Amino acid sequence: MVALVGGMGAPHRPVLLRETIELLQPEHGGLFVDGTLGLGGHSEAILEASGDARVIGIDRDSEALRWATERLARFGERFQSVHADFRDIARVLAELGADDVQGVLVDLGVSSLQFDSSERGFSFRHDAPLDMRMNAESDEETVAELLARLPEEEIARIIYEYGEERRSRRIARWIVERRERGEPITRTGELAELVARAVGHRKSDRMHPATRTFQALRIAVNRELEGLDAFVDDAIDLLKKDGRFVAISFHSLEDRIIKQALRRNAGQCMCPKRAPVCSCGARLVVEILTRRPIVPSESEIAENPRSRSAKLRACRKLDTGRNSGL
């Protein structure tokens, strides 16, 4: 499904849409939670699948909520939006008095709206303030503020761990040297140019040299990996019997956290082999539906290059009751 949203010029292409709908099975109706609503493409497909399907859409980006609410207004009371972080799913549903959840979906990473915005600072394709906050209306720290206060060693660690950038130390050193000269980096163009000079850039390179650094700093400033494993537990606890959980990730660290959380909830102990007792919280409450992650087809990647790194994992809730342990 490709749709133009509101006055946006670029089409919105939900990633792995067919596979997501097949796994969630919204045609049977029920309550679904889209934890990362974005522009509402996945939620729209869920609501179109059955007149008995309802969706609570959560997003911390108020601009995305406005676009999605406009897009999904035709579904009336079957759609409800909430301005919150998906990791607060248990609190959000408790406040709404919602239970018997049939499915939970999260599509992690940057939304099309965020990435294409010329003022949000997510992309080096636009010279903009170096922001990258997913909730632009919050008082949280921007990437520019992060780079202005962190020591060189911490900047290097973030770029290496979250961006898998081999030249992270060189990039961090150049950032700090510029800061010490009284020229802190405040714009995307400045950071992209610095990284390109630090690591070298050839016209034949398929990927811009600043790609990994931008990704790493975005993950850090939005704390994208924090609490992800606990969120999986909460989402599974909220599901009714046979309910489905689907997670789409775009980064190897995110995918690893999701994979390990699903295995732990499928009863697989994640403790070291020599540990005398299990302390990882393993419990048999789900059946994993994706032994290997589902990835986009070649045709989807051709139509939507941003989908190329997507990985989808899913599970089904067993009839064990909530908070069941081994």
Image: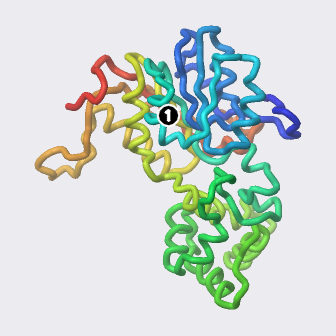
Looking at the figure, which quarter contains the C terminus?
Answer: top left
Asked if residue 136 lies left or right of residue 203, the reply is: left
Residue 299 appears in view: no
x, y percent for residue 190: 77, 74
Above or below: residue 106 compared with residue 31: below
Above or below: residue 172 compared with residue 226: below
Asked if residue 195 lies left or right of residue 88, the reply is: right
Q: Residues within 10 Å of mark 1 (few under 14, many from 20)?
A: some
Please state which of residues 99 and 45 is positioned toward the viewer in this rendering: 99
In the current view of this chain or complex, which residue is farthest to the bottom? 181
Looking at the figure, which quarter contains the N terminus?
Answer: top right
x, y percent for residue 96: 51, 26
Please state which of residues 200 and 264 is positioned toward the viewer in this rendering: 264
Judging from the image, what secondary structure is the residue with disc 1 in?
helix
Residue 204 appears in view: yes
x, y percent for residue 234: 40, 35
The residue that appears at 67% across and 58% down in the rendered structure is 132
The residue at which mark 1 appears reads as 92
- Under mark 1, the amino acid is Val
Please state which of residues 59 and 22 is positioned toward the viewer in this rendering: 59
Asked if residue 259 lies left or right of residue 285, the reply is: right
The residue that appears at 68% across and 79% down in the rendered structure is 198
In the current view of this chain or complex, which residue is farthest to the left? 276
The residue that appears at 53% across and 40% down in the rendered structure is 86
